[in-house]
Amino acid sequence: MEYLNEALKLMVVGMATVFAILLIVIYLGKALIAVVNKYVPEEVQPAHAAAAAGKPAPIPPHAMAAIAAAVSVITKGKGKVAKVEPIK
């Protein structure tokens, strides 16, 4: 019984230590994120990339035909492609 009590004490001390270290890691991580967000400037996009960001590139006709054919095969002719947009 003596060994069981010592084992339980050791387990509680170990778990408390791990919990405390994890809390320290969490709060240090949050502090690091706050410091980096405050003092490190954001990357500036070039003017041509910023202008192109609002307008998606047109889809090539052969890609559009392949998409329409795939939808037709999967839906057995019941589906229709109305609009294709790139995922952001």
Image: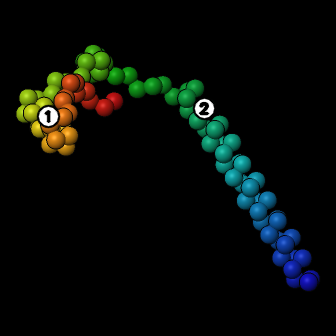
Return the residue found at the far left.
62
- Kindly identify which residue carries mark 2: 35
- Quadrant in which the C terminus appears: top left
> Which secondary structure lies at badge 1?
helix
Q: Residue furthest right?
A: 2
As rendered, which of 88 and 30 lies closer to the eye? 88
Q: Position of residue 61 (x, y in %)?
A: 8, 29
Colour option used: rainbow
Check disc 1 and report the residue beneath it.
68
Q: Quadrant of residue 83?
A: top left
Characterize the local packing of mark 2: few (<14), some (14-19) or many (20 or more) Cα atoms within 10 angstroms.
few
Name the residue at 76% across, 63% down. 15
Q: In this rendering, is residue 8 above or below 63?
A: below
- Left/right placement of residue 8 relative to residue 69 reads right
The disc labelled 2 sits on which kind of residue?
Val
Residue occupying image coordinates x 16% and y 24%: 58
Per the model, the C-alpha gap separating discs 2 and 1 is: 49 Å
Any part of residue 67 in sight: no
Disc with the residue nearer the chain's start (2 vs 1): 2
- Choose between 22 and 2: the one closer to the eye: 2
Residue in view at x 76 percent, y 53 percent: 20
Give the percent coordinates (x, y) of residue 2. 92, 83
Give residue 64's position: percent from left, percent from top. 13, 31
Residue plotted at (18% across, 30% down): 80
For the residue pair 73 and 12, the one nearer the viewer reads as 73
The picture places residue 86, in percent across and down from the top left corner, at 26, 29
Using residue 11 as the reference point, say whether residue 24 is left or right of it: left
* Quadrant into which the N terminus falls: bottom right
Q: Is residue 43 left or right of residue 28?
A: left
What amino acid type should be assigned to the residue bearing mark 1? Answer: Ala
